[in-house]
Amino acid sequence: MTSAETKFSTQFGRPRSAAPQVLRLALRELRSGISGFYVFIACVALGVMVITAVGALTDSLRRGFEEHGELLLGGDVVLSRAHRPAEPEEREWLEARGRVAEMATMRTMARRVDGQDQALVELKGVDGAYPLVGSVTLQDGADFTDAIHTKRGAVVAPILLERLGVKVGDNISLGSISVPITGVVDDEPDSLTDNLTYGPRVFVSLDKMLETGLVQLGSLIRWRYALKIADGRASDEQLAEFRDQLATALPEHGFSVRDRRDPSPRITRSIDRLREFLTLLGLTALLVGGVGVANAVATFIDRRRKVIATFKSLGATSGMILGVFLTQVMLIAAIGVLIGLVLGFLVPVAANAVYGDALPVRISVVISPWSIVSAATYGFLVALVFTLWPLGRAELVRAGVLFRDEVAPEQMRPRSRVIVLTVAAIAALVLLAVLSSESRWIAIYFCLGLTAVFALFTGLGKLIAGLARRAPRSRIPEIALAIGNLGGPGGLTRSTVLSLGAGLSLLVAVALTDHSMVRELTTHLPESSPTYFVLDIRRDDAARFRELVDRVAPGSEIRDAPMLRGRLVQLGGRPVDQIRPPPEAQWVLSGDRGLTYSETVPEGSRIVAGEWWPQNYDGEPLVSFEAELAGHLGIGLGDTVTVNVLGRNITARIANLREVQWESLAINFVMVFSPNALRAAPHNLLATITLPPTADLTKDAELARAISNTFPSVTAIRVKDAIDAFSEVFEKVMTSVRAAGSITLLAGALVLAGALATAQRRRIKQAVILKTLGAVRRRILLSHFVEYAVLAAAVAAVAALLGTVAAWVVVTQVMEIDFTFSSTAVAGALGLALLLVMGFGGFGTWQVLRAPAVPYLRSD
C-alpha cells in the first residue's frame, strides 16, 4: 500500500484487505437509506417480475401436466394411429400388459332430423372400459355409461344444442342413422390431449359409431388405445420399459405413443414457445427500465460528489471508489431483484386462486431453480450494464471538480477496464438470451433489433437536444424557455426519448402485426380461396359428388386429391426420434401427417429442385418434399423417406423439392408421392369447392345441406368457420403478447417518472428564479407544456415509423402474409405517448410550481 492508501485504510480502524473494506464502506453509505433509488428498484423489479412470472407460470403448468398426466391422457400410456384399429394380435399384446380402453375419433356432420340445419362435430366412440382414469361428468348428474351404452344414445356438448336448436330427448342424424340425445357433457377428462378440434364433442358407444356407416376403409378416423400398466402410478422406468417392449414386439405398429410424463406434446411445446417469447418481452421491459437505472445512478453520483472528493483526499484509489459505489448499487439492485422474484412468484398463485377452475389443469404452484436463476441473472446483468458507465466516469473526476457545487457535466470516457466489463456484461446478457431460447436465431434477431432501437432513440435524443441548443431564441418567452429546457444539460430529452420510444415501438409493432394477422385470417383470403374443404369422399362416390355440386351450385369449381394419413418413421435412413430439428419443423415429426399422390405438380406448388415423375410412372416409389421443411430436417434430393401407412412401412426416394404457397388454400401436402407408392392403399378423397362469385349465403347453406343429406359420411368444413376457430386461439395468444408489451411501456413510464424526479431539483430552482423575476404560473406551465408536447410528438412519430417497419418485416418476411397498415394502432401509440408524457410532465410541473421559494433562495 502507498502511504495515502494506508492513511485511508486506517481512518476507519486497523488496516484491512481491500474487498472487506469496500463492502464495509458500501454498507456504511447505505445507512442513510435508499432515497433516490426507488425508481431504480422499481425498474429492476418490474422486469424481473415479468421474467419470473412467465417462468413460474409455465413451470407450474408443466408440473400440473406432469402430475395430472395420467388423468389428462386417460391412462399411463396412449397409442394412436389413423385409419386402422388395432389388429387382434396387437390388442392381445396390449391387454397382456394392463387394462385397455378403445376410442375412435373423427370429424363429421351432425344434422337435425328434418334436414334444416347441421354442424361440424368431433365424434368420439368409446368402449365400456372408457375412461380408465377419471370420469365423464354430465349435466344434471346423469350417468355417462347409462347414457351411451344402456340407452344407446349420444352425449353432446352444450353448444351443439344451441347450434342445432335441439334438446335432450331429441334425435340427431349421424351418418346414416338417427341417434337420441341422452345427455349433455360437463367435463371430459382427456379432452386436452386430443388434437385441435373444430366442432363440439359428441360421444357415442363404439358399437353405435359403427352403425352410422362412417367407419370405412380410408376414412379419416383416429383410433386410440389407453393403457393402464400399473395399479398405482406407473414409474418412469416402467414407461421406458413399455416403449422398448413395444418397439421389439411390434416393430411396424405405426402407433404414435404418449405417456403421462408429457400427455400433450403439442400443448407443452406451445407453452415453451410462449414462455420464450414473453421472456424476451420481459427482457425488453428490463432493458427499457435500465435507462431509469442509469439515471438513478447518475443522480446518486451527483449527490455523492463531496463524499467521493473526501475519499480521494484521504488517499482512496479510483478502483476502490468504483468498488465501493458499485457494491452499493448492486446491493440496491439485489433489493429490486428480490422484490421482482417475490412478485413474479405470486402471479401463478393469484392465477390459480382466481382462474384455477378455468385453467386446463389445477396447477401446483412451483418454480424451477433455473427460472429463479435466469430471472435474477437478467436483473443483475441489466443493472450492471447500465451502472458501470456512469460509475466508471465518476471515478475519473478530479477531487477539485467534485467539490464545486454546480458544474457543467464533463464528457469523458471511463477507463478501459470499465469499458471491457461493460462489454462483457452485454455479451453475457445476449448469450443468456440466446442460449436459453430454443429458437436461437429469433433470439439473435431480437437482440440485434433491440440494439438498433436503443441506438436509434439514443441518437434521436441527442439530435433533439442538439437542435434545441442551436435553435434561434424565440421572442415568445414560453417557447424560448421550452427550447432551452430541451437542450439543457439536465433536461428530460434523452431519458424521455429513449425510454418511451422503445416501449411505444414495441406496442406499435405488436398492434400492427396483430391487425395484419387478423385481417389476413378474416377478410384478406386469396381471391381464389375455396368455400369448403370436403373430407372422406369415397372414391366410388366421386362422380356422384361432382354431379350434385354442379346441379345445386352451377359454376362451382371442384378440385380433389387422394387423402391418407401416415406417420414418419425415418428420414434419410435415420429414425425420426434421433432427429432434432429446429422448433419450426418439429411438428412434421409429431404424430400423423396428411399424405397424397399425384401424377402432376399440385396447384400452388413450384418445383425448385429435381424433376417431377413422368406420367404412368411405375418404378421405385418417389416422393416430393416441401423445400423449406426439407432444409430444416436436413434432407435433400436422393434421400429416402419412410412413412407408416395402415401399419405398413413405405420407403420412397426424394425426387424433387417444392415451394408451396400455403396461403393460396389450395390442396397441398408436405409430402406428395408418386401414384404407384400409395394408389393401392385404401383411402378416400379430399376436395375443395369454390362457389361462383354470384353465389350468396343462401346458396352456400343449400349446398351444405345437399351434401350432408346425400352423402352422410362426408364432412364439409366451411373455410371461414375453420379460420374463425383458429382466430379464437390466436386472440388468446395475442392478448398475452399485448399484456407483455404493455409491461414494457410501463417500464418506460417508470423511467420517465424517475427522469422527472431527477430533474425536479433543477426545475424547482429554475421556477423559483423565474417567479422571483416576475413570471406567473401560467407562463411557466405553458413553457413546460410546449416542452412535453415536442417530446411526445417526436417520440410517437419515430416510434410509429419504427414499429411499422418492424411489423412489416415480421409479417411479410417471417409470416409471409400481406401487411396491412392500421391508422388506429398508430393513433393509439400517439395517444399513449401524449397521455404518458403530459400526465407525468403535468404532475412534475405541479410539484415544481407548489415548491416554496424562500428555502431554495437561502440555500443558494
Image (cartoon, grey):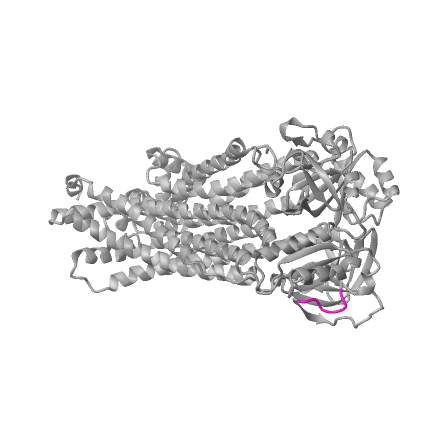
For residue 601: magenta?
yes
In this view, the residue in front, 782 or 572, is 782
Vertically, is 208 above or below 560? above
Query: Is residue 260 visible to the viewer in this orientation of the structure?
Result: no
Give the side of residue 635 with respect to residue 291, left or right.
right
Task: Locate residue 476, reporting x and y percent.
Answer: 16, 59
Q: Which residue is most to the top?
A: 141
In this view, the residue in front, 794 or 196, is 196
Q: Which residue is most to the left?
A: 774
In this view, the residue in front, 719 or 189, is 719
For residue 685, what is the image quadrant?
A: bottom right
Task: Locate residue 787, reporting x and y percent.
Answer: 26, 54
Task: Locate residue 522, reporting x and y percent.
Answer: 54, 56
Q: Main secondary structure of the magenta part?
A: loop
Report the residue at 26% width, 46% height from top: 842
| Span highlighted in magenta in the image | 598-603
Give the side of residue 584 with respect to residue 427, left or right.
right
